[in-house]
Image (cartoon, grey):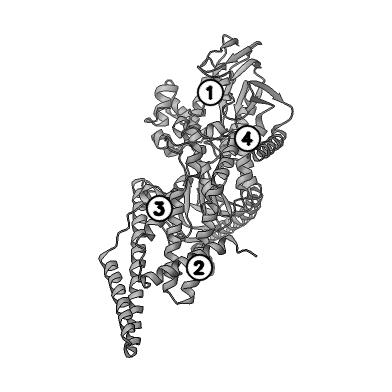
Amino acid sequence: MPPSGHAAKRAAKAEFALNKALDTGGDSIDAEADMANASRDAAMGKGELDLFEKKMTKEEKKAAAAAKRAAKKAEKDAAKGMPAKEEKVVDKAAEAVAAMELANEMANATSEEAKRELALEQLNKDHIQVTYAANKRKIAATDKDINVQDVAITFHGKALVEDTEIVINYGNRYGFIGNNGCGKSTIMKAIAARAIPIPDNLDIYFLNSEYPATDISALQAVFESDDEVAALNAQAEALNNMMAEVEDDDQIGDIQTRLEGIYERLDDLDVNTAETRATSILFGLGFTTQMMQQPTKSFSGGWRMRVALARALFLKPEFLLLDEPTNHLDMEAVLWLEDYLSNWNKILFFVCHSQDFMNGVCTHIVRLDETYKKLRYYAGNYDTYVNTRRDNDKVQWAAYNAEQRDIAEVKEFIARFGHGTVKMIRQAQSREKLLAQKIEKGLVEKPEAPPQYDWSFPDAGQLPMPVLAIESLSFHYPNSADLYTNVDFGIDLQSRICLVGPNGAGKTTLVKLLCDDLQATKGQVKRHSHLKISRFTQHFEDVLDLEMTPMDFFKLKIMPTATIEQIRTLLARYGCSGDKQTQIMGQQSAGQKARIVFAKMAQDKPHILMLDEPTNPLDMESIDALARCLNSFKGGIIIISHDMRLISQVAKDIYICDDKKIERFTGDIMKFKLHQKKVNARKAMAQHKNG
């Protein structure tokens, strides 16, 4: 039976190490091993700041020279036949090897400390501070779980979490949820920077920005990993050399474990299958064969984000962190990504506000409790989390209310009898002492109530038909093929329409045509003369002055005749309350800015709302508030979205934009999801057959 791939690689490496040891007398030091490891870290997404030039210090050079002298002396003594000094020579050689290992360990520690110092320096620049409790247990080389206690993280001096635990276990897929602006992305940034103890053998890839605009193709950007392969080979060679020098069984076992991980990683990056795997991932994320060959600089930021996501999936890091991975995807790509990540067998930790996506992917939910500054952990997907939290809250509310009743009774007793007879005074003092002890031990926490927002759009009045229609419309951008051909489509004040379809099919273009931002190549768009349209775009921040506070913006530009109290009340209804009302909008999260935009849209008093991916920046509570608002709105609605939670609550009609036409889909959004999954499966099968 022929040996396995791993066995053959290990045998080849062992043979190479043995030959090298015989040629050099076993005194070689791989001074580039750490550099190779750092190169691999850079390839895994840690960035240019993680790449350091590894140079030998004076201590390393002395240790290497001592080892070389000891080895040469041993050879000379053996040649002269000096058995009397053999024990002493062996001792010196062993001391030299130990000195070499110590020097290498010091060099590695220095390199890791330098990396951490740079990462922490970047966190300091971002005004992020992290503290945690020291753990007496040393992290083993084979550990793949993360368990850190008493973690505190602050941003610009504001506490995001306090005295909480971060527990992330290998093989689990965590959905990280919390209110807009509570600090989820900041906490992920701190974890990615290794501001808490994380096992060194867990390589981290934190995806929070698009791939840069370069001349290399999208396909090359995803699968090129020559640097990492070279670094892994160098690291394996260094470990083989080390194994030839050590005799301790525990050290040998540790080295073998690390080598197995390296060889598995090399199998993942097999150059013979790299291009095929990269092509499959890009295809799933919506790239055509022609698009894969285009340079990344030819793509928009959203498409370069897909390139970055494809590369993250291709590299298969041990610890993958994703910040809103579905935001730049159409529904077809979201469904593909959901299926792909549901089979992720390493660590996946991601922020997402799509209930359906988290149901399909997550094995665990982590909730950032903004009230008590804690991370709460729940086993199961999002629906399981909702049920578990509801049941836990019922029990906690019962315990909290019972305890509060007991405390009220004790206080009432103390107030009534604290100044009566000696006997009653003693009883009151006794109860007061018991109450103090109970408070000192800790009371039952009041469950965190989910925020309730009161969003609404005023009724702008009715308009006679037709309100908005396109007739025999064709459109194409300059020097491009037709995007639409001979299309008829209309909307009235009772419409609840959701547009779906692949990216590039023309959904946003259709909205621009309806709003007169673009002119039809042929045909016409008919609008009622008194029609008012309000839009939420994917670049929604453009309608805000980010250098102003929400209060100043509304007072000076939106509601100049309103009182401060009226503006304060309006903003609070949309979730912008307290200090956020007087905080510069440019410093606020995307979700907070989106709420301000919806508050502004309400002042437009529109007849028709056109919302392009409105849920991207919103948390679950805001999505539900938007759904309630839209359902009570008296005008027409067009939504472009991939969020099943919103679509299922609002949309009455599903229209597919594709193949230069707009067609109504028969069925609801869940039926469309099943339909699209079948379409994706057929496309994947066709791609597989075509190679």
Q: Point out residue 624 in the picture as x, y percentages from the top left corner.
A: 61, 36
Label 4 vs label 3: CA separation?
A: 35 Å
What label sits on residue 256 in the rendered view?
2
Label 4 residue SS: helix
- Tell me if I can see residue 495 in this picture: yes
The residue to which callout 3 is attached is 39
Closer-to-camera residue (165/174): 174
- Amino acid type shown at disc 3: Ser
Q: Name the residue under label 1.
A: 535
Of the numbered discs 1 and 4, the one sitting upstream in the chain is: 4
Q: How crowded is mark 1: few (under 14 residues within 10 Å), some or many (20 or more)?
A: many
Position of residue 568 relative to residue 460, above or below, is below
Residue 498 location in percent, x, y? 64, 27
SS category of the residue bearing label 3: helix
- Marks 3 and 2: CB-CB under 8 Å? no
Which amino acid, mark 1?
Arg
Left or right of residue 469: residue 118:
left
Mark nearer the viewer, 4 or 3: 3
Amino acid on which the number 2 mark rests in the picture: Gln
According to the image, label 4 marks what residue? 332
* Residue type, numbered disc 4: Glu
Snapshot quadrant of residue 681: top right
Residue 154, labelled with which disc?
Answer: none
- Residue in the foreground of this view, choosing between 660 and 88: 88
